[in-house]
């Protein structure tokens, strides 16, 4: 998920979205319609904590050919098959080879068990 302001654009994970919206909810007591829908989605689909997600993203970015945007997508989706990884990279010029895909899956498995 991307947030965009006039100054900068920053990618954030679903777990971070969940934390931000919960914080806003506590401060304001009520979220607007879009924020409520986004929070429901984040609560339903964010399977890792923000810290676990950040650790996973850091580990993925260390790999060759895994850029920040891919690391965030992988952390949000938590793919468990080679086809899932291929789908994430489907529109990219570079597609990871089988060894790289297995390495990505091992890292995801390691971080989603913790």
Image (cartoon, grey):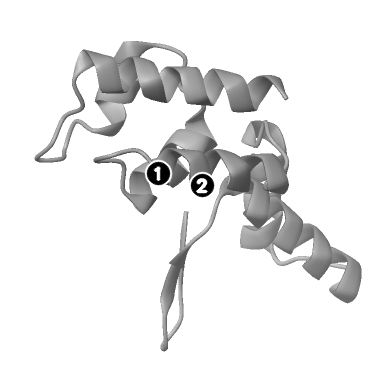
Seen in the image, is 45 located left or right of residue 30? Answer: left
Residue 56 found in image quarter: top right
Measuring 35% from the left and 43% from the top, which residue is drawn there?
70
Residue bearing mark 2: 58
Residue 7 at x, y percent in the picture: 42, 88
Q: CA distance from mark 2 to mark 1?
A: 7 Å
Residue 65 at x, y percent in the picture: 24, 41
Graded by Cα atoms within 10 Å as few (under 14), some (14 to 19) or many (20 or more), the crowding at tag 2 reads some
Q: Nearer the viewer, residue 5 or 112?
A: 112
Quadrant of image for the C terminus: top right
Seen in the image, is 105 located left or right of residue 44? Answer: left
Seen in the image, is 76 located left or right of residue 113? Answer: left
Seen in the image, is 26 located left or right of residue 33? Answer: right
Graded by Cα atoms within 10 Å as few (under 14), some (14 to 19) or many (20 or more), the crowding at tag 1 reads few
Q: Are marks 2 and 1 in contact (CB under 8 Å)?
A: yes
Measuring 71% from the left and 55% from the top, which residue is drawn there?
36
Q: Is residue 33 visible?
A: yes
Measuring 32% from the left and 13% from the top, which residue is drawn there?
82
Residue bearing mark 1: 62
């Amino acid at each position: 998920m991307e947030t965009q302001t006039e100054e900068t654009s920053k990618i954030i994970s679903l777990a971070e979205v969940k934390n931000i919206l919960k914080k806003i909810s506590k401060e304001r007591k009520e979220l607007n319609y879009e924020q409520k829908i986004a929070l429901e989605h984040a609560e339903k689909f964010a399977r890792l904590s923000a810290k676990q997600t950040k650790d996973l993203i850091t580990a993925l970015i260390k790999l060759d050919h895994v850029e920040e945007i891919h690391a965030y997508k992988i952390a949000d989706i938590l793919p468990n098959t080679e086809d899932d990884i291929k789908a994430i990279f489907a529109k990219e010029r570079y597609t990871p080879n089988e060894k790289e895909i297995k390495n990505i899956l091992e890292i995801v498995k390691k971080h989603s068990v913790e």
